Image (tube, rainbow, N blue to C red):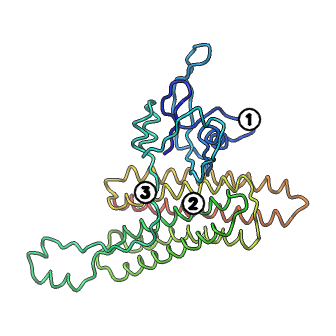
């Protein structure tokens, strides 16, 4: 997590600034992040929260400022930027960042933020079988258990699949933001989709062969199925970009890709909590509500983008047809994440 020092007090703060006329709030945040820290990346249009602080104006009067905080996935840093010599920059772990800032509301936002784990590919470790104390006491139960498969690797595999979603979303966002560079990002999405297929097959195999499962078998297959639908839809979007030879993308398409990055990050935060649904019910509800919130924003962004595209394409019907198809693909990805949030909420209702 990147923090910078303020110019006057030299305290640690997030890159931030005033609303800029003609730019949406998240676009202004991205602009300020470049000017103050030189970072380039993918902003999510939906803030994760806000905080307040007292700003001293030039006349000495203190004014309470309210700051919306947007997730921003950094993809690059410029060699030069406007305020390069005016501030110190430092990367922190989220908990360390929370300890470095002064504002209590900002501390809470940073402490609760979870960065997704890197995608290592398919999880290959096998969860060791757990033998009950009763089986240890009764020899015939030990013999019977020895004939049964172990309890499976369900949680490891769920987490491995979530990692492919994060990596796929990152590649998709780079595809839509990287100024016409298409092929490497499409290949990356295809690789992640194939890894996800491997994970899905492993889960379905365990469902068939494992005697005791952590959730109902239908719930397990539904959960991994919806997760796989999300990465499949990312792959379908990348294929559509390649098929139509698109190299320039509408601003609203880029906004949708930012929402997809955030949905994947939140998913990767939620999935490990399924290991203890009862203890983590409140946090799981908070995270799934976040996904549902940004899905609603994605609908509005998509509708607005299609409307703008229609107005600009009066004499280019094929441009509108292709653009509308891409909007529908992107919106479908976010819809799959909403489906995933609903599956998780169902597990909370059933098991918490």
- Which of disc 1 and disc 2 is earlier in sequence? 1
- Which of the numbered marks, if any, corresponds to residue 270? 3
Mark 2 neighbour density, 10 Å: few (under 14) some (14–19) many (20 or more):
many
Q: Quadrant of residue 204?
A: bottom left
Task: Please determine whether, in this image, residue 88 is positioned above or below residue 79.
Answer: above
Residue drawn at x 64%, y 71% as measured from the top left: 236
Of 49 and 11, nearer the camera is 11
From the image, state whether disc 2 or disc 1 is nearer to you.
2
- Tag shown at residue 21: 1
Give the image quarter of residue 274: bottom left
Q: Secondary structure at mark 2?
A: helix
Q: Nearer the viewer, mark 2 or mark 3?
A: 2
Question: Residue at 63% across / 46% down in the picture?
Answer: 79
Q: How far apart are the alpha carbons under marks 2 and 1?
A: 29 Å
Q: Are marks 2 and 1 in contact (CB under 8 Å)?
A: no
Q: Is residue 317 above or below residue 44?
A: below
Return the mark for residue 170. 2
User: Label 3 crowding class (10 Å Cα cut-off): few <14, some 14-19, many 20+?
Assistant: many
Residue 198 coordinates in the image, percent (x, y): 47, 78
Count the marks: 3
Q: Earlier in the sequence, mark 2 or mark 3?
A: 2
User: Marks 1/3: CA distance?
Assistant: 36 Å
What secondary structure is marked by label 1? Answer: loop
- In the rendered structure, the answer to whether residue 263 lies left or right of residue 78 reads left
CB-based contact (under 8 Å), mark 1 and mark 3 = no
- Residue at position x 48%, y 29% in the image: 11
The quadrant where residue 102 appears: top left
Q: Quadrant of the C terminus?
A: bottom left
Q: Nearer the viewer, residue 247 or 263?
A: 247
Identify the mark nearer the N-term, 1 or 3. 1
Residue 256 x, y percent position in the rendering: 65, 55
Compared to residue 300, the image places residue 84 above or below, namely above
């Amino acid at each position: 997590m990147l923090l910078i020092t303020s110019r006057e007090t030299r305290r640690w703060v997030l890159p931030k600034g005033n609303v800029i006329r003609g730019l949406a709030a998240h676009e202004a945040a991205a602009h300020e992040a470049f000017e103050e820290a030189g970072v380039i990346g993918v902003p999510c249009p939906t803030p994760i929260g806000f905080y307040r602080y007292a700003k001293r104006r030039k006349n000495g009067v203190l004014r309470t400022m309210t700051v919306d905080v947007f997730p921003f996935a950094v993809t690059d840093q410029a060699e030069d930027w406007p305020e390069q010599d005016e501030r110190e920059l430092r990367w922190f772990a989220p908990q360390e960042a929370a300890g470095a800032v002064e504002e209590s509301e900002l501390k809470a936002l940073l402490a609760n933020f979870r960065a997704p784990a890197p995608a290592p590919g398919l999880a290959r470790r096998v969860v060791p079988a757990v033998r009950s104390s009763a089986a240890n006491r009764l020899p015939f139960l030990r013999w019977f258990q020895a004939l049964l498969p172990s309890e499976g690797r369900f949680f490891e595999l769920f987490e491995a699949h979530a990692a492919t979603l994060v990596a796929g979303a990152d590649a998709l966002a780079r595809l839509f933001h990287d100024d016409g560079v298409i092929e490497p990002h499409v290949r990356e999405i295809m690789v992640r989709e194939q890894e996800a297929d491997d994970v899905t097959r492993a889960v379905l195999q365990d469902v068939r062969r494992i005697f005791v499962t952590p959730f109902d078998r239908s719930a397990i297959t539904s959960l991994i199925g919806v997760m796989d639908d999300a990465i499949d839809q990312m792959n379908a979007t990348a294929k559509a970009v390649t098929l139509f030879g698109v190299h320039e993308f509408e601003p609203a398409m880029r906004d949708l890709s930012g929402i997809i990055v955030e949905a994947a990050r939140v998913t990767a935060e939620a999935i490990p909590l399924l290991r203890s649904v009862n203890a983590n019910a409140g946090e799981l509800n908070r995270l799934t509500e976040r996904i549902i919130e940004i899905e609603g924003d994605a609908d509005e962004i998509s509708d607005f983008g299609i409307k703008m595209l229609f107005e600009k394409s009066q004499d280019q019907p094929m441009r509108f047809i292709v653009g509308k198809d891409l909007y529908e693909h992107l919106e479908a990805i976010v819809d799959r994440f909403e489906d995933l949030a609903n599956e998780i909420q169902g597990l909370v209702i059933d098991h918490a």
